[in-house]
Image (cartoon, helix red, strand yellow):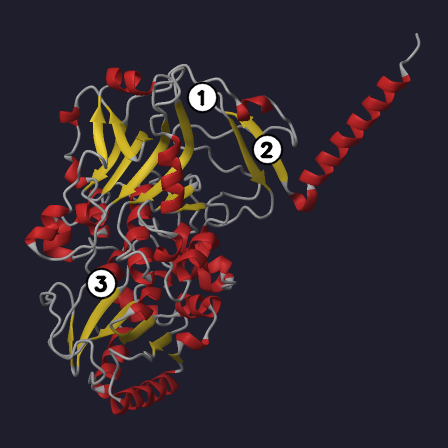
């Protein structure tokens, strides 16, 4: 039988191309794995030595598929391109408009399956709107928040922001002209007011997002291993790129460090999505609007959280509403996937990353736990290095008096030298981001004046001795770091010169004259004695 020479050369070229593809995708111990999921979609994952800590199990396991499928993918041979054409299908699904499902809800924090957007409006497809929470507990008009009746009323949601729609009305409005935005989306509908600040974004908004998301996997372990998929995107529809970037540029460094492949969409992207789905009156062949369907989405709204019961009256922290609704279903290690991912990105040594796991299961923490047992407290300092980190604040406002600052450094230097502890006077502005994370990750106690630098407490390991000490102008108090510290397993002390305050006996939030000033006093010997008593288990 004769062989067509042209066909033979084509087959040889094809085989060479396949060989090169397999070699390329197997480099450095990695494999690109394709597998079909129950919904028929093609999922693809990395498998290799890089999958450790954070969002994967061991290097021999595959990451999980999104929650919607409810199953882990099966392992397949490397490079198998099964159903590859399904990735870019032009055929709409059999049911392009499944109803919207409510997965979790607390004021300001709503988790949806199948949330729709058309012409800039979010739509909930449901046959019965009365089965849902009121819209005012989900979203608000994205305007600057002021504490006066007129502004509070003006922030109530309007139908052009979000609306309920019946399945029949959705069919009439869109037909099958619905495009799926796959995987998990985090959406923040706040104005720029609080999104360009390291603390408010990372330790409030993102902390709340992750608390809700992490509740979907109650089996997160001490090493941060989890079945949670990586979120695909964060959308801030009412801020442009510059409006949600903090001056230290920590926010995007943090997001890309934890989620290297995440997409960040701002108001320009949202406007583009809105324009793409607006009615086109000139096309008589397609009179219907279009819509995007977000398969899984967590919606955060600051003003909606302040309409709840806990945030406005008890904590003043929007993440507290998310914490409360998930307190009975979350792992105590819920924050570890994030903390460990940031530490690994910052080259923190494994022995430091693991300081939170040397305690037995009897040690618990969180808002529901008041104090570990006294025996554990008195022996804890013998089981780990003690590191005291004083965050020195250099700014035009909120500073210690020069005399108090120098006396505090002297007192803490002498204390740590006498005990064999490590003391660091931290000037964050002189350090790289990685160095700042390394400092926080090894700290037993972080102290400083009320301010953004204390946000680094979120990277401290939760231990029986982990503590945040916050210095206020006497008589003043804020709950920013007090609630956050306790939620993440650290004890918190507020300092008024020579007096400390501690939950549950704490004052109301008050910004007294001098709160933001440059003449904040502190009694150095009293503060050093507090630290000594804390480390040695007397308090």
Label 3 to label 1: alpha-carbon separation:
43 Å
Which residue does the numbered mark 2 point to in the structure image?
33
**Which of the two discs, 2 and 1, labels the residue nearer the N terminus?**
2
Residue at the extreme left: 149
Label 2 to label 3: alpha-carbon separation:
44 Å
Q: Quadrant of residue 389?
A: bottom left
Q: Quadrant of residue 365?
A: bottom left
Residue at image position (78%, 26%) is 14
The quadrant of the picture occupied by the N terminus is top right
Q: Residues within 10 Å of mark 3 (few under 14, many from 20)?
A: many
Which residue does the numbered mark 3 point to in the structure image?
480
**Which of the two discs, 3 and 1, labels the residue nearer the N terminus?**
1
Q: Secondary structure at mark 3?
A: helix
Establish if 87 lies above or below 322.
Answer: above
Q: Residues within 10 Å of mark 1 (few under 14, many from 20)?
A: few
Question: Where in the figure is residue 274, as x and y percent of width and height?
Answer: 35, 35
Question: Where in the figure is residue 86, as x and y percent of width and height?
Answer: 54, 22
Let me know if residue 461 appears in the view. no
Label 2 to label 1: alpha-carbon separation:
17 Å
Which residue does the numbered mark 1 point to in the structure image?
39
Residue at the extreme front: 282
Q: In the image, which is nearer the foreground, mark 2 or mark 3?
A: 3
Q: Secondary structure at mark 1?
A: loop
179 or 408: which is nearer to us?
A: 179
Q: Secondary structure at mark 2?
A: strand
């Amino acid at each position: 039988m004769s062989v067509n020479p042209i066909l033979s050369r084509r087959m040889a070229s094809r085989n060479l191309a396949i060989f090169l593809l397999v070699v390329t995708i197997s480099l450095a111990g990695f494999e690109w794995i394709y597998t079909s999921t129950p919904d028929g979609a093609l999922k693809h994952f990395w498998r290799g030595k890089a999958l450790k800590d954070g969002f994967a199990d061991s290097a021999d396991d595959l990451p999980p598929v999104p929650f919607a499928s409810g199953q882990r993918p099966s392992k397949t041979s490397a490079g198998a391109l099964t159903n590859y054409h399904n990735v870019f299908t032009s055929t709409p699904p059999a049911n392009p408009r499944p109803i919207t499902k409510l997965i979790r809800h607390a004021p300001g924090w709503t988790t949806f399956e199948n949330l729709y957007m058309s012409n800039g409006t979010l739509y909930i497809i449901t046959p019965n709107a009365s089965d849902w929470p009121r819209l005012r507990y989900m979203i608000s008009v994205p305007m600057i928040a002021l504490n006066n009746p007129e502004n509070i009323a003006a922030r109530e949601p309007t139908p052009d922001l979000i609306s309920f729609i019946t399945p029949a009305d959705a069919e009439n409005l869109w037909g099958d002209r619905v495009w799926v935005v796959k995987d998990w989306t985090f959406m923040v509908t706040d104005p720029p007011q609080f999104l360009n600040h390291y603390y408010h974004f990372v330790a409030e908004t993102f902390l709340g997002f992750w608390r809700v998301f992490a509740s979907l996997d109650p089996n997160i372990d001490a090493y941060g291993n989890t079945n949670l998929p990586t979120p695909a995107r964060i959308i801030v529809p009412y801020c442009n790129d510059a409006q949600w970037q903090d001056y230290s540029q920590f926010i995007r460094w943090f997001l890309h460090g934890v989620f290297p492949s995440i997409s960040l969409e701002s108001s320009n992207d949202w406007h583009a999505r809105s324009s793409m789905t607006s009615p086109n009156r000139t096309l008589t062949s397609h009179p219907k609007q279009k819509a995007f369907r977000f398969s899984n989405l967590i919606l955060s709204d600051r003003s909606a959280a302040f309409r709840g019961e806990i945030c406005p009256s008890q904590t003043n922290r929007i993440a507290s509403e998310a914490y409360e609704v998930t307190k009975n279903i979350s792992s105590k290690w819920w924050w570890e996937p994030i903390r460990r991912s940031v530490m690994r990105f910052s080259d923190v040594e494994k022995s430091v990353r693991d300081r939170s796991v040397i305690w037995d299961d009897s040690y618990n923490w969180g808002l529901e736990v008041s104090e570990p047992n006294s025996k554990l407290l008195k022996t804890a300092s013998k089981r780990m290095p003690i590191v005291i980190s004083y965050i020195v604040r250099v700014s035009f406002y909120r500073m210690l008096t020069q005399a108090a600052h120098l006396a505090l450094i002297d007192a803490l230097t002498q204390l740590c030298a006498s005990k064999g502890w490590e003391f660091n006077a931290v000037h964050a502005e002189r350090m790289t981001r990685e160095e700042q994370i390394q400092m926080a990750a090894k700290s037993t106690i972080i102290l400083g004046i009320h301010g953004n630098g204390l946000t680094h407490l979120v990277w401290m390991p939760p231990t029986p001795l982990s503590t945040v000490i916050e210095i206020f102008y006497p008589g003043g108090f804020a709950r920013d770091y007090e609630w956050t510290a306790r939620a993440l397993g650290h004890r918190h002390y507020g300092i008024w010169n020579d007096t400390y305050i501690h939950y549950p006996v704490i004052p109301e939030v008050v910004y007294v004259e001098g709160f933001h000033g440059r003449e904040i006093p502190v009694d150095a010997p009293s503060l050093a004695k507090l630290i000594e008593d804390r480390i040695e288990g007397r308090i």
